[in-house]
Amino acid sequence: MLVLGVESSAGAASAAVAKDGALLGEFFVNTKQTHSQTLMPMVEALLRNLGLCCGDLDRFAVASGPGSFTGVRIGVACVKGMALPLNTPCCGVPTLEAIAYGGLSCAGGILCAAMDARRSQVYNALFRAEGGRLVRLTEDRAISIAQLGEECRQYGERLLLLGDGAALCQQAFASWGARLAPEAVRYQRAGSVALLAADKPVLDPAALLPVYLRLPQAERELKRKKELGQEEE
């Protein structure tokens, strides 16, 4: 099975193709350009270098969130646009699961996937690496760094921090032994998305949607203004 994976949920963007559990190729870009400028050119270049076209693919996969509201939307829209013409099956891969996949070789370790959610919070999920697979220990959630530290202190040096929020957490957790994953495997990558996609339920392209844990900032501000207005009445 040929799978194209797309990842654009944070600052970096990437695209990858996997076949029957093996990674054939991956392009990764971490620049100040927006994902709308970089993602499709990467996909096109990757497929061209592999001698493939969209019609050769059996499935499209995307990191479906949480993450940057704009980034996740761009990734989902990109996959839907490529999949719709031939109604190719699609699937969403939770971003935090894709992050944790980078620590899969840490047998017996507790993998703490963390994305910077601002305001001293992270998007987080905990996993255990067991038998070459990820075992989920928590649901995806938005949680304060302080609260996460209290929850994870029991794991000590077994805790491996991954994701773009890992360094923030490590500053708070280092005193009790939490470890920071190496740069090369710390962040979410399209290769992880493509490899994880084989075990995910498929959807029609039109049914593929982003997954958010919080309202976009504009909606949060509007909600706050409405609440303040009601208090003043």
Image (cartoon, grey):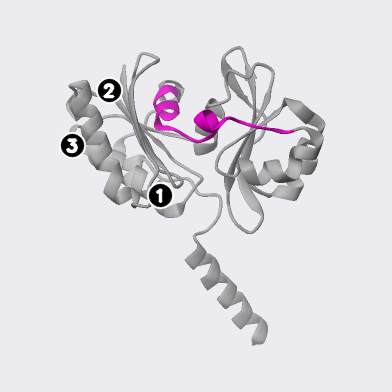
Q: Is residue 217 magenta?
A: no
Q: Which residue is mark 2?
A: 58
Residue 173, position as x, y percentages in the image: 75, 40
Of the residues under marks 3 and 2, which one precedes in the sequence? 2
Question: Label 3 sits on what residue type?
Answer: Pro
Crowd rating for badge 3 (residues with CA inside 10 Å; few <14, some 14–19, many 20+): few
- Please state if 137 lies on the left or on the right of 51 as rendered: right
Q: Which residue is mark 1?
A: 71
Residue bounds of the magenta highlight = 178-195
Helix, strand or loop for disc 2? loop
Residue 169, position as x, y percentages in the image: 68, 44
The count of marks equals 3
Q: Disc 3, disc 2: CB below 8 Å? A: no
Closer to us: mark 1 or mark 2? Answer: 1
Q: Which residue is mark 3?
A: 85
Question: Label 1 sits on what residue type?
Answer: Gly
Helix, strand or loop for disc 3? helix
Question: Label 2 sits on what residue type?
Answer: Asp
Q: Disc 1, disc 2: CB below 8 Å? A: no
User: Residue at the location (42% across, 22% down)?
Assistant: 195
User: Residue at the location (40% across, 15% down)?
Assistant: 21
Above or below, 9 relative to 99: below
Of the residues under marks 3 and 1, which one precedes in the sequence? 1
Q: Is residue 182 magenta?
A: yes
Quarter in which the N terminus is drawn: top left
- Please state if 158 lies on the left or on the right of 73 as rendered: right
Cα–Cα gap, marks 3 and 1: 23 Å
Q: Return the residue nearer the eye: 211 or 166.
A: 166
Q: Is residue 134 visible?
A: yes
